[in-house]
Amino acid sequence: MVRRALISVAVLAAVVLALAIGLVYGLRSRNHNNNNTSDFAETWNSPSEFVLSKNFSITHTPTTRTYDWTISQQTIAPDGLERPMLLVNGMFPGPLIEANTGDRIVVKVTNNMVNGTAIHWHGMFQNGTNWMDGTMGVTQCAIPPGQSFTYNFTVPNQWGTYWWHAHSASQYVDGIVGPLIIHSPDEPHLDDYQEDIIMMISDYYHTDSGSLVSWYLSVDSEGTEPIPDNGLINGRHSWDCSLDAQALFPTDSKCTPGAPMSVFEFMAGTTYRVRIINTGAFADFQFSIDNHTLSVIEADGVDMQPVIVQRIPIHVAQRYSVLVHANQSVGNYWVRATMNTECFNAPNPALDEHIKAIIHYAGAPTIQQADSVDWGASGWSPTCVDLSLEMLKPYFAQPAPNATVQIHIATSFQTVRSDHVNLGYVNGTSWTPLMNDTTLYQAQKSITAYDASQLVVTLNSTGVVELVINNYDEGAHPFHFHGHNFYVLGWGGGNYIPGKSPLELTNPLRRDTSTVPSFGYTVIRFVNDNPGLWALHCHIEWHMEAGLMMQIESLPQVIKTFEIPPEMPAMCAFKSSP
Ligand code: C2O
C-alpha cells in the first residue's frame, strides 16, 4: 500500500485502461437489451447448497468422492449489476466438496474459458501429492483452454472448513471459489450442534479482476489497491444501482435494484454450526449476528476450545466455525459482515461496507428486513488484526516444537523498478509466476538456480522451521502457507525482538492463514515433513499479483522421486497468459 492524496486523475486514466483491458481479456460486455423481469431467477445459486445435508454419513470408512466440473464465462448479476464472471458448472459460489477424513477426492476440471487455469485446494496438506496443489507456476502449468485435467488426492489427518479457488492469475476474484468441508467422527464438537451451514463472505467488484490488476500494477494506482464495490454472503447481496456513476470504476452496466440477500432458516431451539469462510480478495470483515453470541470452535481446520465472542474479525482466506444457538424470540435478525474500511487506503463512494444477510426464524414474517440492532462497539477492532492469540486455544493441545532452523522474512512495497510501479517484495524479490514451467518441475530436474523472480528457500532435512515475518508495509497481510498448518507463536506491532517479544509456546494457535499486522511482525513455526514446493504468500489477491509471495522447497531429495503424471508437465507446452 502507498497512501496518496489525489485519485481522480488516476481513476479517469484507469477507467480507460480498464475498458481497453476488459476487451483484451476477452470479456464480453453484457446484453443491454435484456429487459427480462426474471433477473433474480438465480439459476446460478440456490441457498440449499450452503446447508450441509444430514444424509451425509460421517464415518471412518474411506470412499472416493468424484466431481465433474466445467469452468466457463457467464454473465450474472449477484447484486443486481450484470457482469461477466467465471463460473464452475454455472454456479456462484461454486459447488461444495464434502468428504470424510481419509477419503479420496477426484475432480475433473474442464476449462471452457479463453485463458488457462489451475484449482488450488486451500488448506489440504497434499503430503505426498504436492503436484496436485493446483498452484500455477509452482506445482503445475495452467490447464489450457478446451482441455481437462483431473485432480486426485486423499485427505488423511485433517478435517474442518476449507475452500477451493483458482490459483491462476486473479481468476478466483471473478468467481472460481467454493467450499471444501472435511468431516470426521473424531471431531470433538460434533455432538454440540444439530445443523451445519456455510457462510462464505467476500468483497465484490463490478469490474473484472484482470482489469483491476492491470490498473493496480500501473503507475496510475500509485499503489492503492482496487477497493470493492460491494460484498457478498454466499454470493448474494443487494446494491444501490444509482451508485455506479460514483464508483472507482463505473461500469454503466445493466443494474436491477432489489437483488436479494442470503436468508438462513433457523428453528428455535436448534444449535447451528456456522462455517464462516472469507473467500474475498482484499477486505477484512468483522462478522456478527445480532442478539446471538458466537462460540468459536474451529479456526482453519483446527478445533478450538470454545470461546464466546460477539464479533469476530476474519481476514482473506481464513475460516472460523462458530456455534450459534437459536435461543432468541422468533423473528428476523441481521447477519453482519462489515468490511473494515480502515484497512483500505482510499474510499470507494459506491461501497456500503455493511454487508448483510438474514437469519429467519421459522414462523417469523418472510421479509428482506430485520429490526434487530448491532452489538455496538463491542468487540470491534479497527486495526485489521486477527482475534487475539489468548482467545484461540487449540482443543487438542500441543506445545510448540523447538525450532531447528530460523528463516527471516521481510515484506515491503517499493517503487524501485524503473517504471515506478509499486510492487510487493519478500526479502527483495517480487514474485511473478513462471509461465511455461514450474519450480516443482525445475526442482525435479535439479536446476542450479531458480529464476530471479522466484524466492525459493530450500530445506534439505526434516526439522522444525521458525519463520519470523517482519512487515515494513502499512498494510496488514494475511499470510497463507500451502500444505501446512503452522504454530502461531506471536504477533504484534513493530519488529520482532528475539527474547523480548512475547511468544506463546505451551499451546499456541495452529492454522494455515495468519495476519501479519501493519508495520508489525508474526512468528510462526512449522514441521518440515511435507516434501514439495509450497507457496507462502499474502492472500490478498492484489498483493499476490504485486509479488508478495515466496516458496519453500521441502526435502529436494524426496521431490526427485515424485512420480508426477506425465500429462501435467505436458500442459506447459501451451503458450498462454493465465
Ligand atoms: Cu488459498 Cu495460495 O492460496
Image: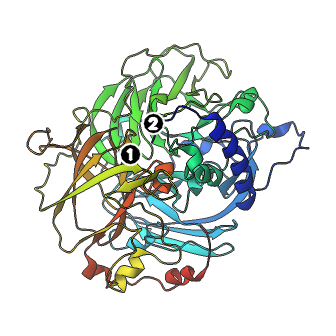
- Going by the numbered disc 1, the residue's amino acid type is Pro
Is label 1's Cβ within 8 Å of ligand 1?
no
Question: Ligand 1 shows up in which quadrant of the image?
Answer: bottom left
Q: CA distance from mark 1 to mark 2?
A: 9 Å
Residue bearing the label numbered 2: 284
In the image, farthest residue toward the front:
418
Q: Secondary structure at mark 1?
A: strand
Q: Which residue: 65% across, 76% down?
A: 147
Closest to the observer: 102 or 349? 349
Q: Position of residue 470 (x, y in %)?
A: 26, 47
Q: Which residue: 70% across, 67% down?
A: 114
Give the position of the C terminus as an image quadrant: bottom right
- Report which quarter residue 139 is drawn in: bottom left
**Tag 1 and tag 2, C-beta contact below 8 Å:** yes
Q: Position of residue 71 (x, y in %)?
A: 66, 62
Closest to the observer: 73 or 221? 221
In the image, farthest residue toward the left:
499
- Going by the numbered disc 2, the residue's amino acid type is Asp
Q: Secondary structure at mark 2?
A: loop
Query: For this view, does 398 lie left or right of residue 292?
Result: left
- Report which quarter residue 176 is drawn in: bottom right
What numbered label is drawn on residue 59? Answer: none
Residue bearing the label numbered 1: 478
- Crowding at dot 1, Cα within 10 Å, few <14 / some 14-19 / many 20+, comes out as many
Query: For this view, does 496 lie left or right of residue 556?
Result: left
Query: For this view, does 231 lie left or right of residue 405?
Result: right
Q: Give the mark nearer the N terminus: 1 vs 2.
A: 2
